[in-house]
Image: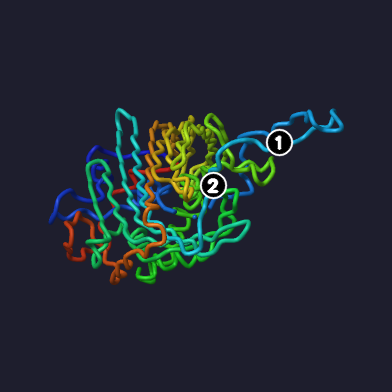
């Protein structure tokens, strides 16, 4: 994503960057429309954070080809006999009714390098959820996701905000509204045996429930913002960062499609369309496997591209990027015990005035699943919050803040953000 800054004077830049205050009991200026854009862009990959266009994803490369040998005992010595490849099975093994707690954390950092207009923004989103196996068919499994807790915080050029759904039910910071509505809410999706999403179930309704307590005059615009922010790419990220990295070789017989050995490599490609088209290529290498776990090394690249900024004037050019990480898979279930992936990319953004600035962005994603609680009933979801009231300052756990005015004087659109 990118962040282009323009201002008439240094004090205007400071005013435009301000979106909250650090500490308790200090009032902050309401976020500007430009700040909202920055936060929306920072949150592009944060939720499941729903799926990418599967038709555009090529099938994963074979991890192992069948071995053709000649049978010495055959009555026809020239006849080829197909022998099943050796290896260990690495796949999802789920039963109807299984429930698994899972925690996903996404930390994003954006730094604008400019001698005259430097800027910095960081967000952290922590999601606690449970995956339930709702149905199992020979060719697919229906998985349901329900969120139980959301922790969101950001730091934009020194202005900080923090929201914890477990402590703040009555007063919700405006910038946390999209996440607050996720608590006690969820959707389902059909996952094929090739670890690709086939169909979303109830996702539109999920988004509508996220904003049902927002005033009517703001609900439709926020719903459109959520659709663009979380969209199909959001669920695709959730799957690709966890279940979707498991091997599947469709070029061999059914029994051998999930068999792997240490050293096997498979590749997946994806194209994200929002907010800027991005082409991702990820390579997975099985480094070790035993009876209980398998370890996978992740390496990837982000191709260079250029596109018109969908959130404002100017163009954004991605110079390229890379990703690296590891994943430890529980062989009993096929779920990730631990995932850690870091993506970095460089961008240049040209404004309508022709000014070009450079930005560096990093996204650190960690996922932890707890299959030891397989099949156990999860704690009841937290109660739904009351009608959302705008607050624009940091709150301590359990604290409430008086409802300030809905908007203040606009200091100008000093920040524009466009980056994947």
Distance from Cα at disc 2 to Cα at disc 1: 21 Å
Q: Which residue is mark 2?
A: 91
Kindly tell me whether residue 203 is visible in this rendering. Answer: no
Chain-order first, disc 2 or disc 1: 1
In this image, 253 relative to 303: left or right? right
In this image, 214 relative to 162: left or right? right
Disc 1 element: strand
Q: Nearer the viewer, residue 280 or 198?
A: 198
Disc 2 element: loop
Label 2: how many residues lie within 10 Å, few (<14), some (14-19) or many (20+)? many
Q: Is residue 205 above or below residue 334?
A: below
Residue beneath the point at 17% across and 48% down? 22
Q: Quadrant of residue 163?
A: bottom left
- Residue reaching furthest to the right: 76
Viewport quadrant of the N terminus:
top left
Whole-percent x, y for residue 208 in the image: 44, 67
Q: Which residue is mark 1?
A: 83
Whole-percent x, y for residue 204 in the image: 50, 64
């Amino acid at each position: 994503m990118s962040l282009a800054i323009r201002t008439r004077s240094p004090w205007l830049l400071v005013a435009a960057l301000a979106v909250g205050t650090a500490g308790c009991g200090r009032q902050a200026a309401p976020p500007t429309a430009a700040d909202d854009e920055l936060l929306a862009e920072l949150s592009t990959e944060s939720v499941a954070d729903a799926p990418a266009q599967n038709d555009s994803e090529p099938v994963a490369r074979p991890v192992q080809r069948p071995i053709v040998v000649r049978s010495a005992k055959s009555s026809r010595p020239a006849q080829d006999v197909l022998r099943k490849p050796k290896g260990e099975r690495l796949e999802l093994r789920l039963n109807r009714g299984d429930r698994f707690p899972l925690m996903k954390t996404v930390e994003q950092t954006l730094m604008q390098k400019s001698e005259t207009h430097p800027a910095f923004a960081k967000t952290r989103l922590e999601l606690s959820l449970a995956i339930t196996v709702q149905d199992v068919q020979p060719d697919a499994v229906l998985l349901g996701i329900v969120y139980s807790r959301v922790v969101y915080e950001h730091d934009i050029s020194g202005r900080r905000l923090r929201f914890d759904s477990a402590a703040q039910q009555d007063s919700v910071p405006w910038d946390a509204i999209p996440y607050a509505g996720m608590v006690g809410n969820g959707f389902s999706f059909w996952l094929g045996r090739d670890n690709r999403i086939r169909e979303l179930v109830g996702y539109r309704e999920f988004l509508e429930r996220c904003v049902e307590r927002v005033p009517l005059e703001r609900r439709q615009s926020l719903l459109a913002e959520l659709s663009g922010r979380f969209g199909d790419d959001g669920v695709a990220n959730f799957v690709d960062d966890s279940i979707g990295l498991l091997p599947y070789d469709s070029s061999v017989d059914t029994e051998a499609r999930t068999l792997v050995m240490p050293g096997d490599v498979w590749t997946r490609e994806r194209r994200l369309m929002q907010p800027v088209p991005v082409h991702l290529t990820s390579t997975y290498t099985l480094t070790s496997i035993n009876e209980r776990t398998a370890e996978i090394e992740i390496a990837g690249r982000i191709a260079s591209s250029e596109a018109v900024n969908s959130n404002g004037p100017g163009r954004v050019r991605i110079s390229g990027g890379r990703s690296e990480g590891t994943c430890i898979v529980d062989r009993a279930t096929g779920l990730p015990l631990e995932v850690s992936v870091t993506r970095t990319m460089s961008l240049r953004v040209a404004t309508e005035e022709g000014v070009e600035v450079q930005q560096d962005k990093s996204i650190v994603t960690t996922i932890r699943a707890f299959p030891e609680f397989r099949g156990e009933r999860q704690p009841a979801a937290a109660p739904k919050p009351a009608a959302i009231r705008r607050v624009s300052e940091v709150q301590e756990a359990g604290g409430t803040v008086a409802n300030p005015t809905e908007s203040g004087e606009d200091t100008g659109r000093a920040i524009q953000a466009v980056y994947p």
